[in-house]
Image: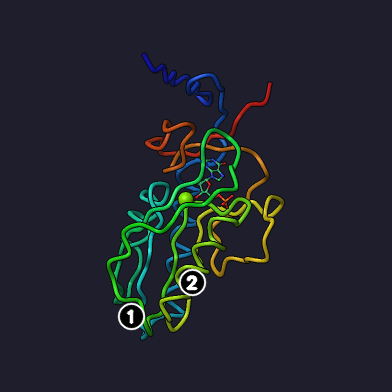
Amino acid sequence: MIELFLCMDKIRILDKEFALSIPYERIHEAVVSMADAIYANHKDSNPLFLCVLNGCFMVAGDLFKEYKGPCEISFIKLSSYSGTTTTGEVKKVIGLNQDIRDRDVIILEDIVDTGITISHLIRDLSGYAPKSIKVATLLLKPKAVQTNIRPDYVGLEIPNDFIVGYGLDYDGYGRNLKDIYKIIEE
Ligand code: IMP
Ligand code: MG
């Protein structure tokens, strides 16, 4: 039986405790700013958003309600994360069923941590000759980035702590939390 205790500003998921870190209101402000910033640069370009599942489903749902211009939205998947550390191994892109040649592609991510996932994704997508590739991420851990990838749009910069909620999981749980919680290290 999986236990998820909700008690004020602290929650427990599996064997770990988490404390409230970013309330939904703050997340929402950041999402609206990102939507406006992207629109300001892509008014006439009919961008194709490629949203990286699973984590980005919440940010995608909120961001596109605020995005004012014409755009296409598609979802792709690739996963390399297990537990609280990056494995370093990145799988292939699944679900790219759209022709991205000559398109302005915007990758939408929940979080850029080491940047390894996003740099592999950019390399793979570049092979399909898009006109441009930009990266928008709700969260960035600047101290964790190990590649020379710098996202073009960042909602919030956060410290190098493991977090859950708003689409982000700990071993599959916690994605449904509306707010973001950070791990309490023993
Ligand atoms: P990267 O390749 O290290 O940048 O990791 C990217 C992916 O790892 C993200 O899309 C998330 O799915 C996952 N990830 C990175 N940091 C966290 C975290 O703090 N909590 C939950 N998932 C994370
Ligand atoms: Mg992700």
The way the protein has been coloured in the rendering is: rainbow
- Which residue is most to the top? 1
Q: Decide which of tag 1 and tag 2 comes sooner along the chain.
A: 2
Q: Position of residue 107 (x, y in %)?
A: 44, 65
Q: Which residue is mark 1?
A: 46
In the foreground, 28 or 46: 46
> Of helix, strand and loop, which one carries label 2?
helix
Quarter placement of the C terminus: top right
> Of helix, strand and loop, which one carries label 1?
loop
Amino acid type at circle 1 is Asn
Choose top left, top right, bottom left or bottom right for residue 104: bottom left
- Tell me what residue is drawn at x 52 percent, y 52 percent: 90
Q: Which residue is mark 2?
A: 37
Q: Residues within 10 Å of mark 2 (few under 14, many from 20)?
A: some
Q: Is residue 103 left or right of residue 90?
A: left
In the foreground, 59 or 126: 126
Q: Residues within 10 Å of mark 1 (few under 14, many from 20)?
A: some
